[in-house]
Amino acid sequence: MPKIIIKNFIFTKKIILILLAIFLVFSASGALTYLFLSNGKDIIREVPPKGMTFEVTVPRNTPEGDTVHIYLHNQNHYKMDKVGDYKYSISLSEDKLQPTEGKVKYRYSRNGYDFRTAEYLEPDTDDYFWTEKGRSTVYKQAFTQRDVVKRWRWFPEDSTPNVRTTTLEPQDDFLKRVGGQEFMSGQIIEDLYNEVFRDFFDSTAKHMKNIGYKLAEIDPPQQLVEENGLPRVRNLIDKNPNYPDDMTLKEEILAYKKQGLKVMLAPQLCCETLNTKNRNKKWWDAYFAEVTKFLAHYAKIAESTGVDYFHYAVGVDYQEKDYTQRWSSVFKEVRKYYKGRVGEMVWNLGSEPAIIPDAKYISWGNELDYFYVAIDHPISSKDSPTDDELKQGAAKMLDGVKQLYNRYKKPVFVRTTYFNVKNTWKGNSFYSISSVPWISEPENKIKATKYEWNTEDLARVVNAYFEAISEKPWIFGYAQFGYTHWENPLATEISVRGKPAEDIWRKWNNTIFKTKL
């Protein structure tokens, strides 16, 4: 037979894709649906037998690196696949969907953080988040449900600008630090751990590196409780946002170390109230033994992961004559297992320059490498202070801790806790950490409070502290509490991430370290 040669019979990729797109292929395991990707790539996604596919288009202001999850009425959630620019998809079996009365109830959320980062729907409440307040669709086998998220909670709509920058500019002068030490510009990572943070350890560390930060602080909590009449340290993870295990904490520490950042570790005993009044010697012996064991445990973690700084907040409840010996012994035990710099945390006491414990009480100060002060008090009581007035107010707060440097010649690290609310410079005389709306609450809750969302005022406070710190070479670092693992631009929370306060921080990093970021 003669050969039959067919020339120029070439199916282009485009033609093949069109054919595949309109043709439904059945296999033994179920149906196959062809999806197009906006970048020209192609993917074939299998629709499970007796299941559905969900495709969603998300707002264009969704940050790069965020993930999209679908939540079902049974409280299970699944991470969706990115199939194009701002497009995500997932196929779920009927067993996973668990339709009720022929319907599937669901909702979309960023980063798997449930209602906190969900799509914005009316009414904005999580009272019945898993059942009535989300989306609903009729269950159809092998059907593709297509949705559009108009906006995320705590995000503006695409048509509204997301303000990330400030017109504030740092001054040129920043005095060298005592002893020639490099200034530690950093952030304190949110300390209420949630398992969804794990996927964002690396991206958060990379983001911090790109902003020019030099340090990340992690404050792992455990609880001090009473058992059989004596204090005991316990990891009550079922009731508290603790790290689930040491490996998770190490993983986060190493994420920052891999980016070349310094790490400060500050273990804390929190979230439980323990009465320390009228306790006998046996009780206090147990207390110091438990605290020592707790800190030694984290000292070993710090040493094994290359942590650079390690400190603990000492209270003033114990007032017996041997208090110096007891606390000195605690810090000496830490040094047995950890070779880095060891410090102690103190609290700013009020609008007048004062700290607790004060320099006189900390009689073991010569054994420490640094001090750490937490400040959330007013730097101005005015509604419209000038930038210079804010600077002077910040300087006054810092002068309250200088007594430690004057006595022990040890440098000081500064931590601030101010919110993204109007007049945040009024500090804790104006706001309460328990009354400012958090992202777990409805967006409109702020309307029923005295607060008003404002990000520029926090930027002004940060700038004021930097200006004051620039003239005080005995301060070796500065950080704001509560840095989040992703952005929430409209939230009143304390994180500076992605907001004007981070922009002025970036500018100060440029000035201090002579870099362009």
Image (cartoon, rainbow, N blue to C red):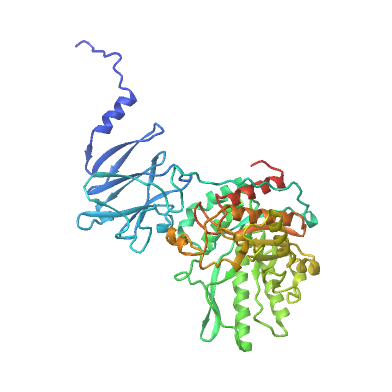
**Left or right, residue 97 beside residue 347:** left
Q: Please tell me how many numbered marks the rendered image carries.
A: 0
x then y, percent, for residue 130: 32, 60
* Residue nearest the viewer, comparing 511 with 239: 511
x then y, percent, for residue 507: 66, 46
The residue depicted at 51 percent of the width and 60 percent of the height is 248
The residue depicted at 51 percent of the width and 46 percent of the height is 162
Q: Quadrant of the C terminus?
A: top right
The residue depicted at 25 percent of the width and 57 percent of the height is 98
**Image-quadrant location for residue 421:** bottom right
Q: Using the image, determine if residue 8 lies above or below residue 495.
A: above
* Residue nearest the viewer, comparing 79 with 127: 127
**Left or right, residue 379 beside residue 22:** right
Residue 458 visible in the displayed image: yes
Q: Quadrant of the N terminus?
A: top left
As drawn, which residue projects farthest toward the top? Answer: 2
* Residue nearest the viewer, comparing 113 with 487: 487
x then y, percent, for residue 177: 77, 55
Residue 212 visible in the displayed image: no
Q: Using the image, determine if residue 436 lies above or below residue 509.
A: below
Q: Using the image, determine if residue 87 lies above or below residue 352.
A: above
x then y, percent, for residue 288: 63, 79
**Image-quadrant location for residue 426:** bottom right
**Image-quadrant location for residue 346:** bottom right
The residue depicted at 31 percent of the width and 19 percent of the height is 10
**Left or right, residue 286 beside residue 62:** right
